[in-house]
Amino acid sequence: MALLSPSRRLRRTVFSEGVEAAGVKAYTVYNHMLLPTVFRSVQEDYHHLKSEVQVWDVSVERQIELKGPDAARLMQMLTPRDLREMYGGQCYYVPIVDETGGMLNDPVAVKISDEHWWVSIADSDLLYWIKGIANGWRLDVLVDEPDVSPLAVQGPKSDDLMADVFGDEVRNIRFFRFKRLEFNNQALIVARSGYSKQGGFEIYVEGDRNAMPLWNALFEAGRKYNVHAGCPNLIERIEGGLLSYGNDMTDDNTPHECGLSKFCDTHDALGCVGRDALLRVAKEGPTQMIRAIEISGPDVGVCDRWWPIIANDKQVGRVSSAAYSPDFKTNVALGMVKMTHWDENTKVQVVTNTGVRDATVKESFWI
Amino acid sequence: MALLSPSRRLRRTVFSEGVEAAGVKAYTVYNHMLLPTVFRSVQEDYHHLKSEVQVWDVSVERQIELKGPDAARLMQMLTPRDLREMYGGQCYYVPIVDETGGMLNDPVAVKISDEHWWVSIADSDLLYWIKGIANGWRLDVLVDEPDVSPLAVQGPKSDDLMADVFGDEVRNIRFFRFKRLEFNNQALIVARSGYSKQGGFEIYVEGDRNAMPLWNALFEAGRKYNVHAGCPNLIERIEGGLLSYGNDMTDDNTPHECGLSKFCDTHDALGCVGRDALLRVAKEGPTQMIRAIEISGPDVGVCDRWWPIIANDKQVGRVSSAAYSPDFKTNVALGMVKMTHWDENTKVQVVTNTGVRDATVKESFWI
C-alpha cells in the first residue's frame, strides 16, 4: 500500500483522537475526510464485526441540511423515490439523480420534520448539486453542511452495548427509524441503520462537545462485549451487496442499473428532475445491471481499477469491488454486467491485476 | 504517515503506470483521484523543481466541459471575474462563488470558443454546482467531465524540454495563453501555466491513446535536462503563495478574504450568482485575509489541521499550510488572519501540533 500525505484538506474528524489511539492502520479519503479502512487486518476486523460489536468513525457521512418552507419540495426534486408517505422520525435510502437519471450520490435522507431534513451522504459533493438546484429554481430553503458527525455501532452485540449507554429504549427503534436520545445532556439522533449487514445503529453527533466522551463511553461499556474500533469492511459489504458510490456506480449509471429500482417510484415522484429520463428507463428496463460475481481461485487481490468482464473475447461488463471471503471461501465481487450475460450461473472471465480468472454471475448476494 | 487503501473509487490516472515506475512514495487524494505528493523526498523534489525540470501527473485537475449556446453566459454566472474581454486561446484563473460569495473552487477557465469552455478544477465536485445551476436556470448548455488529463512540465528548463518535444513554437506561448500543438497526430492544448512559480506548461491530454507515449517522450527528451517525475511541492507552493482549495480556503471564505480581489470585477460581472453578496463585501472590505506567516524555530512539521493563531490569549486567525523552507531557512506558512493583526510584522503565536511557536505576519510571500 502507498503512503497518504496528511494535510488540512483531508479533514480529521471529531473522533480522530480515538481512532488513532485504537491503532488505525490505513485510511481512505471520503468526502475530503479521513475514513479508517483497517484496524487489525481486513480479515480480523471482518470476523470480529460478524461476531461481536464495533464502533466506527463514519464522520465522513457528512450531512447536508435542508431547512425552510421548500425543504420537502427540494428533497423530492432530488430523488425518484416517492417521499409523500414519509414522516418525521424515518430514514429513507434515496438514490439522487441528475436530469438524465444519472446517479449523483446514494445517501440516507433523515426527515426531522417537513421543513427540516438531513441528507447523510456517500462520497461526492452533493451539497453543490443541491445548492445549485435550490438557487436555480429559486427555492425558499437553506442548504448547508452542519457540524454533525455520525458514529456507527455495528455487529450482533450492538443492541446490548447501545442499551448500556443510551438505555433500553434503543431496543425499540425499528430499522431505518430514529429517536432522539440523551447523552450527557445532549439529545442525539440515534437511528437503526449502518453500512453493514450485522445490525446496529448510527448516532448523529452534533458538534464536538460530546464526541470523544461518547466514544469513550461506548468503549468503557463495551469491554464486556469485546468491543473494538472498526470501519466499513470491504469483505462484509461485498458479501451483503452494499454498493459503494464511486466504486460500483458513478454518474454514468441509473438507479435501475444499480439494482435500485425498488427505490424508484418514478410515476409518483412528481418534481424529481430526473423523472422523464427515468420513466423511459423504467419502461424499457436497463441494459446492464449490478450483479454478484464469484471469481474462482485464490485471493484475487485488490480491485483498484475496473476489471473487464469477458465472454467470447468480448467485454460484457466490469468488476468494481472484490475481496476474498473467508466465510464463503471464494472471491466475492460486485460488477456491472450486460443483460446478455447477467443470468444466474453465466460463466464469464474477469481480467484481474494478476491475470484472467474464471468467474460466475450469481443471482443474489452472499448473505 | 498512514497507509492509503487502494480502491476503484480513488481513481488511477492515464499516467499512473509512469508515476509508479518513477518511484512515487506517497499520494494525496484529489477529486477522487490519486495525486502524487513525494518522489524522492519533499525537500529533494523541491530543490530539483527549482533548478531543473519535472513532469507532473496532474490528471486530478479534472476538466468540466461547457458546450452550447449558453456556455459563456453560464461561465459568467459562476464567477465574479469579468469575462467579456476574454478570447479563445486564453486561460483565466477564476474564483467560483455561490450566491453568498463563498468560494466553491478556484479553477482555471480555458476558453476554446464562446460556446466551448473547459474548467480545470481544484479539489471539489464543481461539476455538481455547474450542472445544478444549468438545470435550475434552464440554460441551453451541456455540462460534463470529458476524458482530459493534464500533464504539467514545470521548472526553469521547461521551455527547452517542451521545445524538444513540441517544437520551438511552445516558446512563443505567453503566460496563461494556449495553442493547439501536434503530438503523434493529435492536436493537444498546451498552455503556459501550472501550480508552481518556476515556470512551465500544462498539456491537456485528451483520451489515453497518447498519454504514456507523451510521458515517455518527455522523459526520453528530458535526459539531458536531468528531468524527473515530480508533483506540486508543498514548500515551493507556500513560498510562492499559491493557495490550495480545501487547505487555505473553503466555502466559508469570500475571494476577497483569499486575497483574490483582483479577480473580482464585481460591478461588471453581471449575471454572477454571487454578485450582490460580493458587492457588499467589496464595499466594506473583508475582516480577515490570507497572509504569509513566518513561524520561528526548527521544522514545524505537518499542518494536518487548522493551527490557531493567537495574540493576547485570543484567537486572531488560523494557519492552514506550513513547511520548513530550506532556501529561506524558516518555516513558511499560509493562514487567515483577522484585520486587527494582519499588518506587516505583527507578532503572533501559532499553536502547532508540537507546541506554541512565535510567528510573524508578513506583507508578501517569499518569492
Image (cartoon, coloured by chain):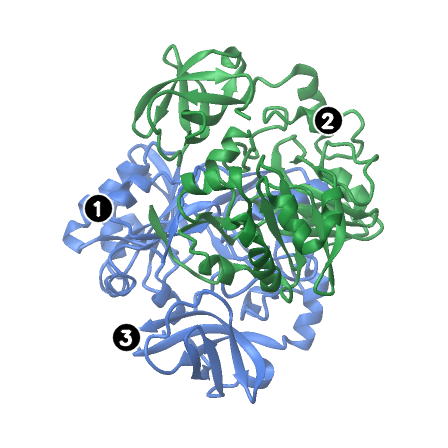
Chain colours: A green, B blue
- List x then y, in percent, for residue B11: 43, 40
How much space separates mark 1 and mark 3, taking CA atoms?
27 Å
Q: How many marks?
A: 3
Residue A55, above or below A307: below
Looking at the picture, do discs 3 and 2 lie on one chain? Answer: no
Q: Which residue shows up at 78% across the image and 32% down it?
A: A82
Q: What subunit carries mark 2?
A: A
Res. A276 mark: 2
Q: Which residue shows up at 45% across the image and 26% down it?
A: A332
Q: Amino acid at mark 2?
A: Asp
Q: Amino acid at mark 1?
A: Phe
Q: For mark 3, what is the residue?
A: B327
Q: What subunit carries mark 3?
A: B
* Residue A207 visible here: yes
- List x then y, in percent, for residue A338: 51, 17
Looking at the picture, do discs 1 and 2 lie on one chain? Answer: no
Q: Are marks 1 and 2 in contact (CB under 8 Å)?
A: no
Query: Helix or strand or loop: what does disc 2 sit on?
Result: helix
Query: Helix or strand or loop: what does disc 1 sit on?
Result: helix
Q: Are marks 1 and 3 in contact (CB under 8 Å)?
A: no
Q: For mark 1, what is the residue?
A: B219
Query: Helix or strand or loop: what does disc 3 sit on?
Result: loop
In the rendered structure, the answer to whether residue B20 lies left or right of residue A275 reads left
- List x then y, in percent, for residue B189: 39, 44
